Amino acid sequence: MAVVTAFLEHSRPRPRTTRLTILARDPSVLDPATGHMLRAVVDVPASRLDLGPRGPRFYVIDFDASEESLHDPLDLAPNPEPAPGWGYHDAFAGRPDADLLTNPGFRAQNVYAIAARTLATFEAALGRPVPWAFPNSQLNLVPAAFAEANAYYSREDQALYFGYFKAPRNELVRTSLAHDIVAHETTHAILDGLRRRFDVPGMPDQAGFHEGFADVVALLSILAVPESIGALVGRPSDGSLSSDELTIEALRGSVLFTIGRQFGDAVHETRGGGLRRSIEITPTNEWLRPHNREWQEPHRRGEIFAAMVMQAFLGVWTARLAPILGPAVDRGRVVEEGARAARHLLEMCIRAIDYCPPIDFDYADFLAALLASDKEVSPDDPHQYRQAVIDAFGAFGLRASALKSVRIKLKEWPSYRSFSYAALRSDPDEAFRFVWENVGLLSVDQRFYLNIENVRPSVRVGPRGFVVAETVVDYVQELILSAAEFNAICASEAPAIKAPSSIPSGTQLKLWGGGTIIFDEFGALKYQHAKPLADWRRQAARLAYLVDRGWWDTKGRIGFSYGDSLGERFVALHASGDNPDETW
């Protein structure tokens, strides 16, 4: 009997989530109702935790390289029952602001909870675990890494580093206490694991996507927390809002859409307004002109992406509010509709990553991928999210009507001779054999080396419970040749195209191509989104852009790397560029 009792005690289901206190924005954003820092209590995936906290995916190490000091690790599970590491305890619920600002344990909890919540959002939207881009299951989180106005992800160190610095008014600014900065940096690490080639030298949109997408995830993650919207929309003392407070123009002016408010106000004291407010960019197609240098800069290019997505969010939110507008609108309903819209649009953007080509993509590719992937899980789209995205991207010159569909229109049935359907959904060798057997159908050029980079089965659940099982296969092709050899190929296949004249004929070039193939739950071919390597016009445009940006590597080659020191690519992303107002 004792043995049975012990078995039952230890077989009780573990909690799926735990609730932890975080800062909903950053220390500069106060709750108008209380005057205290705006907080939120959020669901965080539950797992066995050691001191740090240290779980299966994240390890918080509070080491300060500037002070050469190591703070004691936080214990989020001080209760040994029912099993060691599972008795979660939110030690900072209800604690005063001063304690949250100065206690090393809270910054450890803040970075852990936000990073874990961000990863969980990606995995729920994609329907599978997300790997890191390095051979380790744990990403290190360093909440007080150095006395510097920066925060960045390092693939080589397998870590997110969060700096701190003294503001001009002697205020201590900690990036680890800013919800948007922590979510932004976590997104860099997640996106690097999903698409390592998004960080190779590519076209302007690819160069800006890491920053723009990280901003979008940060903003929509915050907006999906009801406390963030509830405290910052309208008058907190009143249970209702007027319709005038809920127009697109009124909402656009809110602090809700500011990235890095405390950080930006401290670094740019005279300018104010945080780091970035992409929502305020006036819709324009000037950024599409290849010779407009302002919009070629990666940070500015990223702002265009964030602006388009956030304009779509505003469109959806206000459309959801339209049926209830009147002299007085229930404040709780406004908050609920905003949080739902943010969560839904965030998941749409995340799912689109799987449908994007793995290399040399642009924002038009992302738009096509978003529309195709969302239609799979939400065929009816009752709240017109896709139309809001089409309208927002269209205002910036990207017309959905001009996109090439990524759905395969079969002229012939693909060859499945002697294939194992189970292996096709998991084995790169089987996926390669499928591509090899169907090169004509898939328009894959056999002259170039081809590598299957990923085979990822996914089970996605749409907003209304619609379940879609798919397998995502990414393949990449590369070609290394001299500028003279590039011109010789073009002379034969595309006579009007040449490499930029500023590239010496002997310079080595690296060209990329590839695609993404989507199989349905039965192993049948459903989608392909390809960027052929032999698209010489695109290759020449890419080379011209890389030369214009000065992105030669340390060996004088083009297309291999950005020329940064090992491990410093994401540091460079957050350094000053052509835009003098941008330092992060």
Image: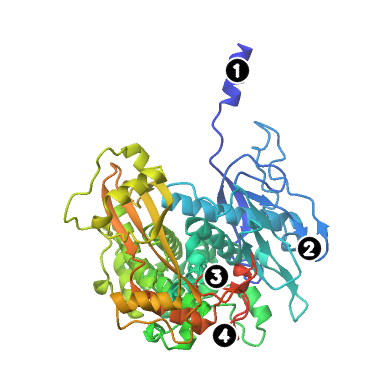
Looking at the image, do the residues carrying marks 1 and 3 touch, with CB atoms under 8 Å apart?
no
What residue is shown at x 26% (from left), y 68% (from top)? 404
Answer with mark 3 or mark 2, whichever residue precedes in sequence: 2
Answer with mark 1 or mark 3, whichever residue precedes in sequence: 1
Q: Nearer the viewer, mark 4 or mark 1?
A: 4
What residue is shown at x 39% (from left), y 55% (from top)? 474
**Crowding near pointer 2: few (<14 within 10 Å), some, many (20+)?**
few
**Marks 1 and 3, Cα distance to the nearest angstrom?**
61 Å
Image coordinates of residue 306 in percent, x first then y, are 46, 73
Q: Is residue 439 above or below residue 200?
A: above
Front-lying residue, 518 or 420:
420
**Marks 3 and 4, Cα distance to the nearest angstrom?**
19 Å
**Marks 4 and 2, Cα distance to the nearest angstrom?**
30 Å
Image coordinates of residue 424 in percent, x first then y, are 35, 42
Answer with mark 4 or mark 2, whichever residue precedes in sequence: 2
Q: Residue reaching furthest top? A: 1
Q: Which amino acid does the dot numbered 2 rest on?
A: Ala
Q: Which amino acid does the dot numbered 3 rest on?
A: Ser
Answer with mark 3 or mark 4, whichever residue precedes in sequence: 3
Which residue is labeled 1 in the image? Answer: 5
Q: Nearer the viewer, mark 3 or mark 2?
A: 3
Helix, strand or loop status at disc 1 = helix
Q: Is residue 489 left or right of residue 502?
A: left
Residue 31 appears in the rendering: no
Looking at the image, do the residues carrying marks 3 and 2 touch, with CB atoms under 8 Å apart?
no
Numbered marks: total: 4
What label does residue 561 carry, if any?
3
Which residue is labeled 4 in the image? Answer: 578
Answer with mark 4 or mark 1, whichever residue precedes in sequence: 1
